[in-house]
Image (spheres, rainbow, N blue to C red):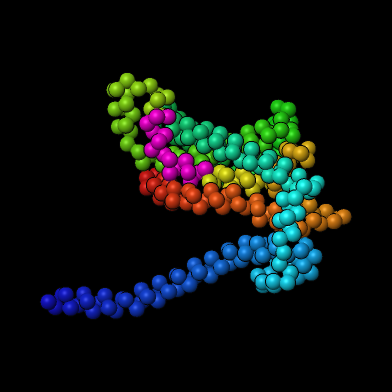
Amino acid sequence: MENQKERKSKSLARTPKRLVFSALGTGFFVLLSILIAFPVVAGLLASFRPGTELIRKGLSIKIDPKTMTLSNYLYLFGKNEDSDKYFMWYKNSLIITVLSVVLTLFICYFVAYGLTMYDFKCKNLLFTIVIATMMVPFEILMLPMYKEIIKLGLIDTYAGVLIPGLCNASTIFFFRQYLSGLPKELLSAARIDGANEYYIAVKIILPLTKPAFASMGILTAMGSWNAILWPLLVLKDARKFTLPIGLNTLLTPYGNNYDVLIAGSMFGILPIFVIFLIFQKYIIDGMTAGAVKG
């Protein structure tokens, strides 16, 4: 009885401390959420104001019904030269993003599958080299990659934008961590049943990695959709520009089309936002499962 009383008294003494730490933690994350949400909310409200208002007052979260208008979006979705260019850039970004996600995921999956499920000489050395490439800044690799793309004749092509990023080290690492948590007995059982290696990799193991595919797919899509530096180097024809590059061309020393820029930027967030809302459960599952076993 005395031990129980002591435990109760200790737990009661700890309760105020826990409440304080919980309140501090909640307050911190609420503040962080507000700081993150502010640019998005301010940009959304700015997209309903005339471009002249943005120049005069800048970004603001104040709602003034007198200045709020749908003219920016009506102009964006109307039939004019600026809207035609915008949706051409939008289409280019969609094509590059879809191709990047599909090719990157499957290439990185099979690389990680080989490094995880098979035992061969220099396996750990190869994986160490893959991890080492994550420590090299893109700015150092940019010039040699650009020279290589020129030699291959892929300047001003979608292939020139896509190829350098298809074998992504961080994606390989994530897939390997996830696959390391799967029992290798699945391979032995499938081989005993007469399944070939391709069938095992695609029909047995791949369906088990859906959370990893979903989480890496979203991260790859975000990176490809928002990329500007490498596509800016490779693409020369304005008709092939991606959305970030195209929107950047609206700001010039001779004039700034803020109406299309702000409305187009908000509309450009939509695909990634929708994908994230649909697959956010898989992101959490994939991240936690991939961190179980190293």
User: Is 227 placed left or right of 218 in the picture?
Assistant: right
Span colored in magenta:
202-217
Q: Is 78 positioned to the left or the right of 209 in the image? A: right
The residue at the point 69 percent across, 71 percent down is 65
- Residue 275 image offset from top left, x and y in percent: 53, 48
State the residue at coordinates (53%, 40%): 169
Residue 193, above or below 208: above
Residue at (48%, 46%) from the top-left corner?
215
Q: Residue furthest left?
A: 1
Residue 173 % position (x, y): 48, 41
Along the viewing direction, whichever of 133 and 159 lies nearer the viewer: 159
Quarter holding the N terminus? bottom left
* Outermost right residue: 254
Q: Is residue 147 visible?
A: no
Q: Quadrant of residue 161?
A: top right
- Magenta: main secondary structure equals helix
Between residues 274 and 39, which one lies in front from this camera angle?
Answer: 274
* Residue 76 location (% of width, % of height): 73, 52
Task: Find residue 163 and report its image quarter.
Answer: top right
Q: Quadrant of the C terminus?
A: top left
Q: Is residue 231 magenta?
A: no
For the point 23% across and 79% down, the residue is 9
Quarter of the view holding residue 133: top right
Q: x, y (%) of residue 53?
A: 77, 67
Q: How many marks?
A: 0
Residue 276, visible in the rendered structure: yes
